[in-house]
Amino acid sequence: MAEYKQGDFLELVIDSYGMDGEGIAHDENGFTFFVPYALKSEKVKVRVTYVKRQLIFTILLNVIEPSSERIKPECNRFPRCGGCDLLHMQYKTQLEIKKQNIENLFKKNVMLNIKIEDVEPSELELGYRNKIQLPFGTVNNKVAVGFYEKNSHKIASITKCFLHGEWVEPFIKCALEYANNNNLTVYNDITKKGLLRHLVIRKVDNGYTVVLVTNRELPPNINKFEQLIEREIGSTFALYVSIKQKQDNVILGESMIEIRKYDLYANILGLKMEVNPFSFLQLNNEIRDKIYNYVISSILKAKKDNLLVIDAYAGIGAIGAKLAQNKIKVVNIEIVKEATQDADRFKIINNLDNDLIQNINGDAAIEIPKVIDSNQDKQIIIILDPPRKGCDRNVLESIKKIKTDYKIYYISCNPATLTRDIQILKENNDSLEIEFVKPYDMFPQTSHVETIVSLTLKNQK
């Protein structure tokens, strides 16, 4: 039986894809080889980097026989920059891989062979992202910004990003000019010293929010940074400094200092939303609207006079707002206090009916049973749109205790936690049926995918 060790050079033929879009190969002895950036049917030369029992991890050295699906990436930082996974393959192949991965996870985690609809493509394959978060680093003794190389804290410096479009470039130019002209230092994770941590920029309908995240103090001559931006793009931006001291993976700090005020708004399904640095917005406006419209139209088709919609991870409650405009009673639950405050403001700005929409700041696991108990006569629809880590187990258990019929629309950005959560909901609950699974490509050129699942529980009375 063959044995493999770190440093071995091998030639492999790729036969399938992994969850991150990497190439997979197998040998006759049952070993599985993972080859990032290799495509199915390609013959490749690799070097072994890590061996774990039957799993062999490698890096791609050379494509000996390329696939017809391989394309030349426009970006000269790919694949060194960790921002993209799939820029080397045709877009239709990306969509096929994402659909297959969802199918595999339903088989593995939910034990179901279920029909997955084709992935809804993004009209923009590049330039679709409306927000960028760039760590600062040092390259050739100068301040740089970029993305971390995969599995490292080493910066791959950039001056543009194809996923975001040309609007990013003047902000990067200004940040680098400001930092290097004022001899600013860069934060070091090991020593905990240095000033600059991240540059965060978001593009909305009428301008931009710009946040400079720093370590412990306000940067000197910050007005110079403001002047540089105004020189490049004009006056349509708000500027903040966020001071970050906690040692965690959250990018923005605990405090937010407003340097330049500018009122910014986003249009979501015809509704007006005030935007601040802490606001949550989906990164792909087009796909966000398609997902929201699909859920809204599905609910409206089943509309009954006694309908109640509970959005358990509501944010500002955009879906609920559109439903309330269609005379449907909505309860938005959100555990983040600032998001609930934004939701209250959102309701006022858009003249939403107070009798039809209620915003609750609290834990959905606690609040859902309360809402159900006070609405025994209602037909219940629950919307779940959690972060990547999925739903809190207590939230799922609170839903499982509902005794009346209900429907769930689960919107997920992570098929692994989506399928895990569906399996939890289905435990000892054979009456819970999956109606459809519809993926959307919120994140072209990456391995990520957004998915809507509709589940229905009947005959519980």
Image (spheres, grey):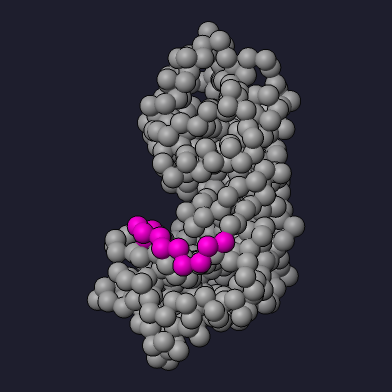
Work out whether 259 lies above or below 230. above
Position of the N terminus, as image quadrant, is bottom left
Q: Which residue extends farthest bottom?
A: 140
Query: x%, y% of residue 245?
Result: 29, 64
- Residue at image point 58% right, 66% down: 237
- The residue at the point 37 percent across, 31 percent down is 394
Q: Residue furthest top?
A: 461
The total number of labels drawn is 0
Q: In the displayed structure, does residue 174 sit left or right of residue 304?
A: left
Q: Is residue 113 left or right of residue 184?
A: right
The residue under the point 31% across, 78% down is 194
Is residue 302 something that shows in the picture? yes
- Residue 258 magenta: yes
Instruction: Give the magenta-colored segment's residue range.
Output: 250-262
Can you tell which quarter of the image residue 264 is in? bottom right
Residue 150 within the magenta-colored segment of the rendering: no
